[in-house]
Image (cartoon, rainbow, N blue to C red):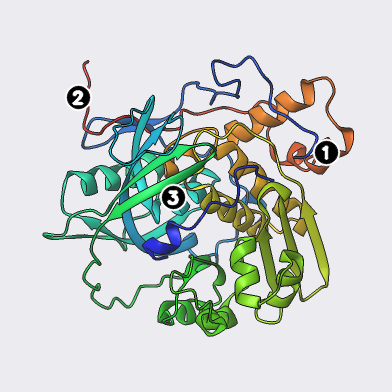
Amino acid sequence: MSAAGARRAPATTHLPLLGLYPPRGFGQTGLIPAPRTGARTVTTRDGEHLGTAAGLDPLAALRTPADPPCDVYLTGSVFLDIIFTGLDSAPVRGTESWASGMGSSPGGVANMATALARLGLRTSLAAAFGDDHYGEYCWDALEQGEGIDLTLSRTVPGWHSPVTVSMAYEGERTMVSHGHEAPPPEPAPECPPPARAAIASLAPDRAEWIAQSARKGTRIFADVGWDDSGRWDPADLADLEHCEAFLPNAEEAMRYTRTDCPLAAAHALTEHVPVAVVTLGAEGAYAVDGSTGECAQVPAIDVQALDPTGAGDVFVAGFVTGTLADWPLADRLAFAGLTAALSVQEFGGSLSAPGWSEIAAWWQSVQGLPGQDPAALRRYAFLADLLPAAARPWPLRRAVPTIGFGRNG
């Protein structure tokens, strides 16, 4: 996945549960906090102590000794994200704005990799890391903190980490980025590796690794970045011939298919890819399986969004998880929307991604609140069979104002 792909617009600020709402009275934001209990931790090179276990393997019932070592492969550049939150409005030219909150976290392709790992998928990342403190921090956070396999990644000597500054306000965000293309890696026979799935961000130039992975039997899931050229040339999606699913947002889908309805765009896309998933903003998400004719739509969860950075990546990770676990299309779509909705209640891009403990806490909480819509609850009843009766939360790492803090004791 390219940096541009990792920077795509989030799926939505109101993210796929009509009729369900989070409990209030949980701190100043009124949102469910991440539960924290004891769990295995490791210490990184900068002294940070990180939780490492996702706590649930969604593919446990499907695993065999012949399976590839990793569930999902992805590639791209890792950014350092610096996020400002709590701005009352967009910065005004010629003035100084103060934010009430600030966080730092790995970004770029790290958003997707972290979301996958926190959902229990064995994730392999081939990425370029900067030869600086930012790169060192990101490497430790992903490898030791999230359990992501970085065997195929590399630190580029003399190359500084790309940086994005994200400012969240009024439910949206504005980003400023700086970086340079990393030198191309040396050819490696083991890259791309055998994997159940791979995630790619489509670009005008074909990516040879996508075809290579598909020939090995890897299931390819694709998204796409905003076309700054304004051409929206369907030829830029040529790699869809190797893909199982394509997950654009509504605007992207309509522009590429020359339609004025996102649902029509989803159906049009199934002429090029078996499964098309279109996120619809406040309307939720819609999916079509062209091979079976099955369609599914889920409404949006109305949440108080703190920072939507990376929500689109979390949505894709949720859908990939459900697909690899052989869930019905509607359940995959609902789960993707739920994970994305939980992510926007934290800030920090990659480190806002939820784990199973937070999914379990949400499900237990909404069931216990009066006035919930029974039909909406039934839409998420599949979670009851996935989650353990007594979920063991683990301390997910969240974005902190800066990096490299020392620890006493």
**In the image, which disc is placed on residue 387?**
none
Quick check: marks 1 and 2 in contact, CB under 8 Å? no
Residue located beneath label 3 in the image: 111
For label 2, the SS is: loop
Query: What amino acid type should be assigned to the residue bearing mark 2?
Result: Gly
Q: Looking at the picture, tell me which residue is in the foreground, 77 or 385.
A: 77
Quarter assignment of residue 280: bottom right
On the image, the x and y values in percent for residue 357 come to 58, 32
Residue beneath the point at 78% across and 43% down = 382
Is residue 236 depicted above or below 138 in this figure?
below
Alpha carbon of mark 1 to alpha carbon of mark 2: how far? 46 Å
Q: Looking at the picture, tell me which residue is in the foreground, 263 or 197.
A: 263
Alpha carbon of mark 3 to alpha carbon of mark 1: how far? 29 Å
Residue located beneath label 2 in the image: 406
Whichever of callouts 1 and 2 sits on the residue coming sooner in the sequence is 1
**In the image, which disc is placed on residue 376?**
1
Query: What amino acid type should be assigned to the residue bearing mark 1?
Result: Ala
- Observer-side mark, 1 or 2, equals 1
